[in-house]
Amino acid sequence: QSALTQPASVSGSPGQSITISCTGTSSDVGSYDLVSWYQQHPGKAPKLMIYEVSQRPSGVSNRFSGSKSANTASLTISGLQAEDEADYYCCSYAGSSTFWVFGGGTKLTVL
Amino acid sequence: EVQLVESGGGLVQPGGSLRLSCAASGFSFSNYAMSWVRQAPGKGLEWVSTISSSGAGIYYADSVKGRFTISRDNSKNTLYVQMNSLRAEDTALYYCAKGDKSPRQLPDYWGQGTLVTVSS
């Protein structure tokens, strides 16, 4: 069982918006603004999409945005495109003992 | 361009050992924390270990503590993990990941991974 809870799957049609939640605890997501989101296409390495809750790396589309409220972080993808179909993982710093925790991943299907 | 190339994976028997390497290029290796993250077949990502830029700070997941040893050679721009007493549940694709100046910061670049299979 993963430390952070994500929905197993979400889906949306091209052009629509979807949001993926990532629920942790007051020991990880709720305590640190160190939450990242990764996109992983089949057979490929993870790619950083959002860091520090809401920051977007250079080169990542502004259709991707992140936010956090209490112990839950969220990734929103607007204007869904076929190439967005992938697995998405959240990750949070969780203190010096546990260090990093990942969510179980969410499979995004673009209908 | 940041490049991380893992090597050293393979088939090993339970109880055996393996050392993975990660050759880094395209950034000032000695200034950044580095980590290993693994992914079992068909499963999600699992953090394994992180080492600070100088090597002074080292962190392990409970699942590998006492069996795995992370290290780095800043003169060779290379990250390592020595894996001992391997178990079937260690079977996974092992990714090398680049961090930031602080070890707490989550990774920004990942290698393509090297596969470790523990089986008799």
Image: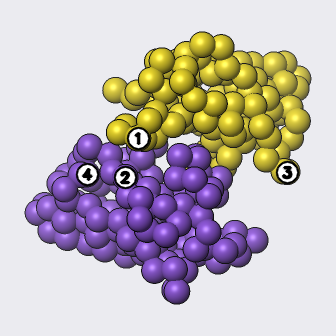
Chain colours: A yellow, B purple
Chain letter of the residue beneath label 3 in the structure image:
A
Where B119 sits versus B74, above or below? Answer: above
User: Which residue is drawn at the image coordinates 54% and 61% (left, top)?
Assistant: B33
**Callouts 1 and 3 close, C-beta under 8 Å:** no
> Which residue is the site of mark 1?
A96
Measured as percent of width and height from the top left, residue B14 is found at 13, 61
> Which residue is the site of mark 4?
B64
CA separation, marks 3 and 4? Answer: 35 Å
Q: Earlier in the sequence, mark 2 or mark 4?
A: 2
**Discs 3/2, front:** 2
Classify 10 Å Cα crowding around label 3: few (below 14), some (14-19), many (20 and above): few
**Callouts 2 and 1 close, C-beta under 8 Å:** yes
> Which residue is the site of mark 2?
B59
Measured as percent of width and height from the top left, residue B25 is found at 64, 77
> Which residue is the site of mark 3?
A59
Image-based side of A35 in relation to A82, left or right:
left
- Circle 1: element type: helix
Chain letter of the residue beneath label 1 in the structure image:
A
CA separation, marks 1 and 4? Answer: 16 Å
**Discs 2/4, front:** 2
